[in-house]
Image (cartoon, rainbow, N blue to C red):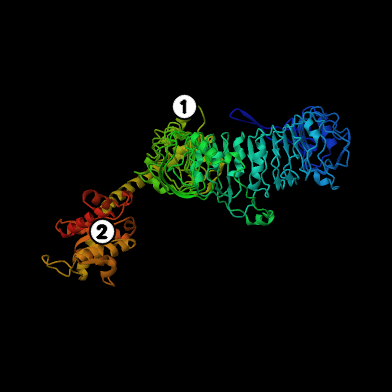
């Protein structure tokens, strides 16, 4: 069997990675290396596995997993051959007895995991006949208390394990740790969590833990704790990490007692998450709850999933100066004065506050215990650190840390803690147009901001300054607008994630789009995937000379128009899920050149685009085949031949290699030349017709009207026309016409022609339009974005333009009112030419500007 063993080694950038392979008795175990063997769920006997290890000349097993094999007992000689193991995992079996001497030969074992078996190790009436190896440093006995049914339970005597450092055990109700635990001076980590085994410690008295003198890490999460005495942890002088999370009956009422006893420890991290049920009214963190924490060395405080809605004013003043990390995820914070005292946490470096206002599965409601306690109201004077004078003194000695009397706010801008580097506020349903916001202090240390998965629908800005910000996450914010100055104060930014927004329209603007990113000269990674982008201006990334990775995947881009001359560091490009058929040579050459200069491999992802083997894209297809090792997931690309049939990777490569010969065919040259000449002539003729199309349409319509007898109502050119003005507008702007144009102009005794009111029923629309223009002294075009979408509105504009040129002796009868900002790219060529060579009138709602607008309009109509 050993001769059949195969190991595959992959070398990825110089790192050797081993691939799991079958090994062991009957070849049914799994190995990741020759020193690690996993025989879990194989039902192999312990003696067979250990015999294989003992007799193997290839394997030098130090780590063995024998979990989930339904073992019921361990006999003395079952483990012979495994006595040189460093780690042995026997968890989740049915082991109820271990014969004395089973571990006698083990002199190297450091980790023994025997969790979730049926050993009666907690039964105080049963004398164990075996001992664990004296070399054991980590021992997992959790999940075995279910075997003790006598009710006379106690913690086992492990004092003989002089090397024990980590211990997993079940938490026993109303039981203290015996005095012999004082003798285990090496024990540093004790886990009693109900998440790993069984724990039912309802009350922690002053004596429950008093013999755990040397423990530094204590995990009592999910232990059904309801009450903790004020001196519960007082004797644990070396305690640094305490986890009391998921004890749903604790509430903040117990935090006072906990913080009192933690004064006498070396506490660094306190996890007090989910001490309330998931559902219920919001909770408030009060001064008395954390008062004694001021006198601790706490570095990390975790208060996740506690429904915290409010924090008592001035509470943040009492946060210990040593606190560096604050985790308050999955709560429901609302604004109050405490948020203006953020800078009082002077040493704070990291804040994790994501998942605010999260929706929770209502099925959890019936699975959690009822909150059957009430908060005990106490006199606030008992804690010396809560005294008003003490709080005022801290406030005065701390920069930008105000003290509020009776919630009276006397600051205008909140300050960030001067040491703050990282803030996570993702997935919190915050809905904002992020407008101008001054960040203080201006020399702040913030390096990482995550505001993803919210509703920042507009990033107007500017916000900042953030002189050291390197990582900014704004993904999935339903954002459709970015202000040109939003990134003004992000000079140090290196990673910018803007994926899954709606930025396609704003970025495609030729004048607006390129300005957005012009100040981001240090950005190395830019993610714009899933932004409904179909076009980007050529200069959109011109100033981003440090850009290394660009992600434009999951958009609708068909052609690469972006100027890459300044992108001298770009080596990783994701264009998957677009509409590309080829990439320009200037881009491919740039990627090769950049990669060569940086001494690394360039990569492109072009999945979910479509590539056809034809002569038009011959150069790119050949380049793609040549550099297929640089194409990420190349075998997942979509390839087609000229008929549209799908090709495999091998067929595609073969077809591309034949393109050079096929594209030299003289027949093809003749055919394409003939087609080219025909197309050229068609284009020339079509261009002439297209250029004069409105003139032709106008003359044809005039001829038709005259032949059919439609004439002016007044044929005498010296007589007045029927209307003073024909108003051309889109139906979407009807309210402006009714509320503004008609009252103002008819008040001046002007007679207006409106298509909704004055067109002759039954006549052809085109005829009605031309008659209205010819019988009006002026045609007033109300130009808007909706106007450009209407083919009849565009028709009215061009007919009025033709009337000015050919029927009014050169006199201009066309007046254009610019109702709103209309992008020039949306205008027709004729309209753009007219706008550039004629004066138009801009409408504004500003009081003085609006008066000037009406004066200009009336003057234009009376000319």
- Of tags 2 and 1, the one toward the viewer is 2
- Would residue 411 be seen by someone viewing this image from the given angle? yes
Seen as rendered, the residue at the extreme left is 718
| In the displayed structure image, the side of residue 498 where residue 6 appears, left or right | right
Disc 1 packing (10 Å; few <14; some 14–19; many ≥20): few
Residue at the spot x=66%, y=45% of the render? 254
Vertical arrangement, residue 372 with respect to residue 436, above or below: below
Residue at the spot x=15%, y=69% of the render? 714
Quarter occupied by residue 176: top right
Q: Judge by depth and name the residue closer to the eye, 453 or 536.
A: 453
**Label 2: element kind:** strand
Seen as rendered, the residue at the extreme bottom is 762
Residue at the spot x=58%, y=33% of the render? 322
Vertical arrangement, residue 208 with respect to residue 592, above or below: below
Residue 793: percent from left, percent from top: 29, 60
Circles 2 and 1 in contact, beta carbons < 8 Å: no
Question: Label 1, on which residue?
Answer: 597
| In the displayed structure image, the side of residue 836 where residue 541 appears, left or right | right
Which of marks 1 and 2 precedes in the sequence? 1
Where, quadrant-wise, is the N terminus in this rendering?
Answer: top right
Q: Judge by depth and name the residue closer to the eye, 467 or 307.
A: 307
Residue 233: percent from left, percent from top: 70, 38
| In the displayed structure image, the side of residue 838 where residue 274 appears, left or right | right
Name the mark on residue 826.
Answer: none
- Would residue 615 be seen by someone viewing this image from the given angle? no
The alpha-carbon separation of the residues under discs 2 and 1 comes to: 57 Å
Question: Label 2, on which residue?
Answer: 781
Residue 67: percent from left, percent from top: 78, 40
Residue 521: percent from left, percent from top: 42, 34
**Label 1: element kind:** helix
Quarter occupied by residue 216: top right
Vertical arrangement, residue 55 with respect to residue 41, above or below: above
């Amino acid at each position: 069997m050993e001769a059949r063993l195969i190991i595959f080694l992959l070398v990825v950038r110089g790192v050797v990675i081993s691939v799991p392979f079958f090994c062991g008795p009957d070849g049914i175990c799994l190995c990741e290396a020759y020193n690690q063997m996993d025989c879990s769920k194989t039902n192999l006997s312990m003696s067979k596995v250990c015999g294989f290890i003992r007799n193997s000349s290839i394997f030098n097993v130090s780590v063995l997993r024998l979990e989930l094999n339904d073992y019921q007992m361990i006999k003395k000689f079952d483990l012979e051959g495994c006595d040189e193991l460093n780690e042995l995992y026997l968890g989740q079996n049915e082991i109820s007895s271990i014969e004395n001497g089973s571990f006698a030969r083990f002199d190297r074992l450091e980790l023994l995991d025997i969790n979730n078996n049926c050993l009666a190790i907690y039964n105080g009436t049963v004398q164990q006949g075996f001992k664990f190896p004296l070399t054991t440093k980590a021992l997992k006995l959790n999940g075995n208390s279910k075997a003790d049914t006598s009710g006379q339970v106690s913690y086992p005597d492990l004092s003989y394990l002089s090397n024990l450092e980590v211990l997993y055990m079940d938490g026993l109700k109303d039981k203290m740790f015996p005095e012999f635990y004082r003798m285990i001076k090496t024990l540093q980590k004790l886990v009693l969590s109900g998440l790993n085994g069984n724990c039912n410690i309802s009350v922690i008295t002053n004596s429950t833990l008093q013999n755990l003198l040397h423990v530094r890490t204590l995990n009592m999460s999910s232990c059904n704790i309801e009450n903790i005495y004020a001196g519960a942890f007082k004797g644990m002088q070396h305690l640094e990490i305490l986890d009391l999370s998921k004890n749903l009956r604790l509430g903040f009422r117990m935090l006072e007692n906990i913080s009192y006893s933690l004064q006498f420890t070396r506490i660094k991290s306190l996890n007090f998450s989910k001490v309330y049920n998931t559902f219920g009214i919001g909770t408030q963190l009060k001064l008395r709850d954390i008062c004694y924490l001021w006198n601790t060395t706490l570095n990390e405080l975790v208060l996740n999933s506690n429904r915290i809605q409010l924090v008592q004013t001035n509470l943040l003043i009492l946060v210990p100066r040593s606190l560096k990390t604050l985790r308050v995820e999955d709560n429901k914070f609302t604004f109050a004065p405490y948020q203006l005292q953020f800078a009082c946490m002077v040493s704070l470096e990291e804040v994790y506050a994501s998942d605010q206002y999260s929706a929770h599965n209502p099925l959890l409601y019936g699975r959690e215990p009822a909150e059957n306690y009430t908060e005990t109201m106490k006199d606030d004077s008992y804690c010396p650190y809560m005294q008003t004078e003490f709080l005022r003194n801290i406030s005065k000695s701390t920069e930008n840390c105000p003290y509020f009397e009776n919630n009276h706010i006397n600051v205008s801008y909140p300050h960030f803690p001067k040491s703050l580097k990282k803030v996570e506020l993702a997935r919190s349903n915050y809905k904002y147009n992020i407008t101008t916001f001054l960040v203080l202090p201006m020399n702040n240390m913030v390096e990482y901001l995550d505001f993803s998965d919210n509703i920042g629908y507009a990033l107007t800005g500017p916000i900042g300054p953030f002189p050291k910000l390197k990582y900014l996450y704004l993904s999935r914010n339903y954002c459709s607008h970015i202000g040109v100055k939003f990134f003004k104060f992000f000079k140090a930014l290196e990673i910018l994630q803007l994926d899954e927004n709606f930025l396609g329209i704003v970025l495609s603007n030729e004048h607006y789009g390129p300005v957005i990113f012009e100040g981001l000269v240090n950005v190395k990674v830019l993610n714009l995937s899933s932004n409904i982008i179909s076009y980007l201006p050529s200069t959109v990334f011109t100033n981003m000379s440090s850009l290394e990775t660009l992600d434009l995947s999951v958009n609708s881009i068909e052609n690469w128009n972006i100027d890459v001359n300044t992108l001298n560091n770009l080596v990783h490009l994701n264009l998957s899920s677009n509409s590309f058929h080829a990439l320009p040579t200037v881009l491919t050459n740039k990627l090769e050149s950049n990669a060569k200069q940086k001494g690394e491999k360039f990569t492109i992802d072009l999945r979910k685009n479509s590539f056809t083997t034809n002569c038009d894209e011959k150069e790119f297809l050949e380049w793609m085949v040549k550099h297929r090792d640089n194409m990420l997931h190349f075998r997942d690309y979509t390839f087609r031949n000229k008929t549209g049939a799908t090709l495999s990777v091998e067929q595609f490569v073969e077809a591309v290699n034949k393109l050079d010969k096929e594209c030299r065919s003289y027949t093809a040259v003749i055919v394409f030349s003939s087609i080219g000449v025909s197309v050229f002539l068609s284009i020339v003729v079509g261009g002439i017709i297209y250029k004069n199309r409105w003139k032709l349409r106008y003359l044809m319509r005039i001829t038709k009207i005259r032949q059919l007898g439609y004439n002016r109502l007044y044929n005498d050119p010296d007589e007045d026309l029927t209307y003073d003005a024909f108003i051309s507008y889109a139906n979407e702007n009807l309210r402006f016409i009714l509320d503004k144009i008609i009252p103002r102009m008819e008040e001046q005794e002007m007679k207006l022609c409106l298509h909704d009111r004055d067109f002759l029923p039954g006549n052809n629309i085109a005829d009605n339009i031309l008659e209205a223009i010819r019988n009006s002294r002026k045609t007033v075009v109300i130009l808007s974005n909706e106007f450009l979408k209407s083919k009849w509105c565009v028709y009215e504009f061009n007919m009025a333009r033709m009337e000015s040129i050919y029927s009014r002796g050169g006199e201009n009868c066309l007046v254009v009112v610019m109702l709103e900002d209309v992008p020039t790219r949306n205008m027709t060529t004729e309209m753009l030419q007219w706008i550039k060579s004629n004066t138009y009138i801009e409408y504004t709602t500003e009081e003085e500007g609006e008066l000037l607008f009406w004066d200009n309009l009336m003057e234009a109509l009376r000319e």
